[in-house]
Image: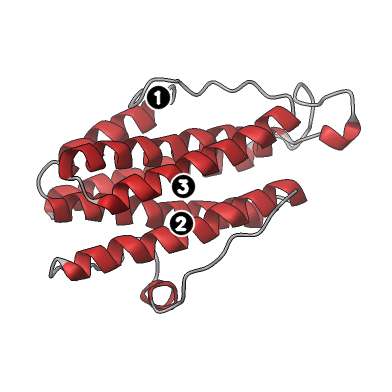
């Protein structure tokens, strides 16, 4: 658990620093606009979108690995959901004429911090099935925190809608991982969410995503 906490702290640090860097940049839309002004996006929003797409890839790739390692169906199911999230974000990337730099290779990331984090999470998840489930819950917790920050920071309604769909998915995923830990006689303690926010999610019902089209 001590090693897990260090990795979780690194995860939060990486995502928080990325968020701060994105938001501190000029909100000018120079160099990221299409000629069509309806497809304009700020530099901060563009950076956040690109990062979030690769972050979702980290989740997908980690869950694919855990499914191969432990054969637990939840990993297979949620990896498919993460692929859907990646696809939703790709639509936004293409809408704003941004360059998609996501690698097609599993476990390979352009962002060096995400690459380091992925390697550490995979090493952790090998310890046991419960360790793998904890990795899943850790990723989903930070996703929730990160998505909420991006939603609060942007005035772009398309991004707000897309991020909200991902947020609903992350809450459902967190419920699933925690339920599976409970079934394996392990009581999970939230690492990034407040106890109040965590309890509200865990005690809530499964949520259905909406459409942004």
Label at residue 187: none
Q: Residues within 10 Å of mark 3 (few under 14, many from 20)?
A: some
Q: Secondary structure at mark 1?
A: loop
Q: Residues within 10 Å of mark 1 (few under 14, many from 20)?
A: many
Question: Measuring 37% from the left and 61% from the top, which residue is drawn there?
Answer: 174
Looking at the rendered image, the disc whose residue lies closer to the viewer, 2 or 1, is 2
Image location of residue 185, percent across then percent down? 12, 70
Label at residue 109: 1
Q: Quadrant of residue 38?
A: top right
Label 3 to label 2, Cα distance in Å? 10 Å
As rendered, which of 210 and 197 lies closer to the eye? Answer: 210
Chain-order first, disc 3 or disc 2: 3
Judging by the rendered image, the residue that carries numbered circle 3 is 81
Chain-order first, disc 2 or disc 1: 1
Label 2 to label 1, Cα distance in Å? 21 Å
Looking at the rendered image, the disc whose residue lies closer to the viewer, 1 or 3, is 3
Residue 59 visible in the snapshot: yes
Is residue 145 shown above or below 85?
below
Q: Secondary structure at mark 2?
A: helix
As rendered, which of 175 and 99 lies closer to the eye? Answer: 175
For residue 155, side relative to residue 141 (left or right): right
Q: Look at the numbered discs 2 and 1 and tell me whether their residues touch, using CB distance below 8 Å.
A: no
**Colour theme:** secondary structure
Question: Measuring 76% from the left and 21% from the top, which residue is drawn there?
Answer: 31
For residue 184, side relative to residue 45 (left or right): left
Label 1 to label 3, Cα distance in Å? 19 Å
Question: Measuring 89% from the left and 23% from the top, which residue is drawn there?
Answer: 35
Image location of residue 106, percent across then percent down? 35, 25
Judging by the rendered image, the residue that carries numbered circle 2 is 170
For residue 101, side relative to residue 139 (left or right): right
Chain-order first, disc 1 or disc 3: 3
Question: Measuring 71% from the left and 51% from the top, which residue is drawn there?
Answer: 212
């Amino acid at each position: 658990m001590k090693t897990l906490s260090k990795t979780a702290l690194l995860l939060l640090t990486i995502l928080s620093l990325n968020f701060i860097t994105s938001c501190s940049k000029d909100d000018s839309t120079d160099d990221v606009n299409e000629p069509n002004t309806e497809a304009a996006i700020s530099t901060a929003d563009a950076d956040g979108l690109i990062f979030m797409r690769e972050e979702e890839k980290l989740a997908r790739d980690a869950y694919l690995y855990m499914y191969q390692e432990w054969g637990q169906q939840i990993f297979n199911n949620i990896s498919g959901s993460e692929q859907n999230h990646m696809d939703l974000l790709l639509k936004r990337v293409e809408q704003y004429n941004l360059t998609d730099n996501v690698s097609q290779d599993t476990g390979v990331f352009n962002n060096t911090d995400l690459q380091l984090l992925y390697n550490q999470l995979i090493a952790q998840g090998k310890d046991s099935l419960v360790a793998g489930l904890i990795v899943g819950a850790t990723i989903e917790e930070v996703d929730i925190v990160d998505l909420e920050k991006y939603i609060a920071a942007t005035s772009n309604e398309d991004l707000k809608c897309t991020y909200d769909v991902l947020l609903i998915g992350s809450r459902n995923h967190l419920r699933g991982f925690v339920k599976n830990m409970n079934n394996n006689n392990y009581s999970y303690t939230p690492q990034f969410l407040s106890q109040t926010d965590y309890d509200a999610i865990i005690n809530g019902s499964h949520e259905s995503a909406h459409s942004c089209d």
